Amino acid sequence: MNRPLARVAIPLVLSLSPPAPADDGGDAWPLHRGDPAQTARAAGSLPDAPELLWTFPVGSAIASSPVVSDGTVYFGADDAKLHAVRLDDGEERWAFETGDMIEAPPLVAAGRVYVGSSDGLFYAVDAATGRLAWKRETGAQILGSANRLVGGDGRLRIVVGSYDATLYCFDGETGETVWTYVTEDRINGSPSVADGRIVIGGCDTNLHVVDGETGEAWKKIPMGDACHIAASAGLAGGDAYFGHYGNEFVRLSLETGEVVWRHAHPTQAFFSPPAIGDDVVLFGGRDKRLHCVDRATGEERWTHRARRNVDAGPVLCGDRVAYAAGDGRVRIVRLADGEEIWSYDVGKPILASPAIAGGRLLVGANDGNLYCFGAASR
């Protein structure tokens, strides 16, 4: 498994209920893909022609997807720092330094920002001040986002995967290890969570469904040789939606472990996490396209062509879809037919998934800038 794969991977958390827009009425995007089930559905709307409102330069590539909470944008970068900037104007609030680059997206919960670093440490930082609350060591780098759930004791739990092939569950307040779950190879992605269960894939070619209370395996579903799961899954209606190295994007029943449908490509893999709509699923591919397929059947409805790989995950917002690609462009297309409405060229590849909060579109790029687009006057 090579580093480009690692840079685009993310953990995943399960939801057995219908997908819902992001928390807080659309003014927040507090975790990667918007919600614990990682459906990537944003509330609110985007303007017809977003303008560049501000940029925040960090001087090194940004592979960490941004999150937003209480008017602040949080993201990591290859400068080894977790950054906090104001959503309104892009002014820096604070920066927290780790021992290596941060490719993992942060998670904001209960007044703290949780993030893993390539230094092998997992950090909990005060969201208002940037002061360290606690840190814990894992056996290798952390490249996927953390996720959240509430234990039977009512306490916040934080789950995150590491390249040491282990899924960790920490007490959100104290950082104490609640349990660990060991897989057979590196974990690239982010866990997805719902109904007390956690779903995560990885380099061992299995999709793991884990009991959030005990850390015990509820189900381990093999996907086949060479079907490494590089990206996070989206979860809705008891099913998981995800792509893998075996050149397929699939819908899989978590109850039966059976594949409902396969959307296959003859030569190209799917690293992008999905956005899940009421009747469609959207995801990027190494075939340089954004795909929109029927949620019930997996049949293609339309594609939108980029000039490079689409490894970042799209975001669904009303009747529009925002996505970014390795060609350095961030685009908005119409959900109904994939027609392009707007695009902006940053000039360097984009590996990080966009975020949408408060009518603003945020994305980091390999040119070392975080970009914020929106309406010129609010």
Image (cartoon, grey):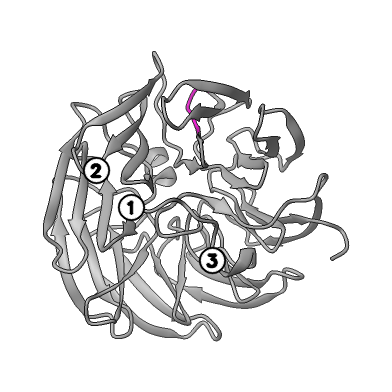
Classify residue 328 by image quadrant.
top right
The image position of residue 332, as x and y in percent, is 70, 39
- Say which residue appears at 34% left-offset and 63% top-offset: 119
Classify residue 153 by image quadrant.
bottom left
State yes or no: discs 1 and 3 in contact (Cβ < 8 Å).
no
What's the mark number on residue 23? Answer: 3
Q: Earlier in the sequence, mark 1 or mark 3?
A: 1
Q: CA distance from mark 1 to mark 3?
A: 17 Å
Q: Is residue 357 left or right of residue 132?
A: right
Give 241 or 351, whichever is nearer the viewer. Answer: 241
Q: Residues within 10 Å of mark 2 (few under 14, many from 20)?
A: many
Classify residue 360 by image quadrant.
bottom right
* Count of numbered tags: 3
What's the mark number on residue 104? Answer: none
The residue that disc 2 covers is 254
Q: Residues within 10 Å of mark 3 (few under 14, many from 20)?
A: some
Give the amino acid at mark 3.
Asp
Q: Residue furthest top?
A: 266
The image position of residue 313, as x and y in percent, is 51, 43
The residue that disc 1 covers is 16
Q: Earlier in the sequence, mark 2 or mark 3?
A: 3
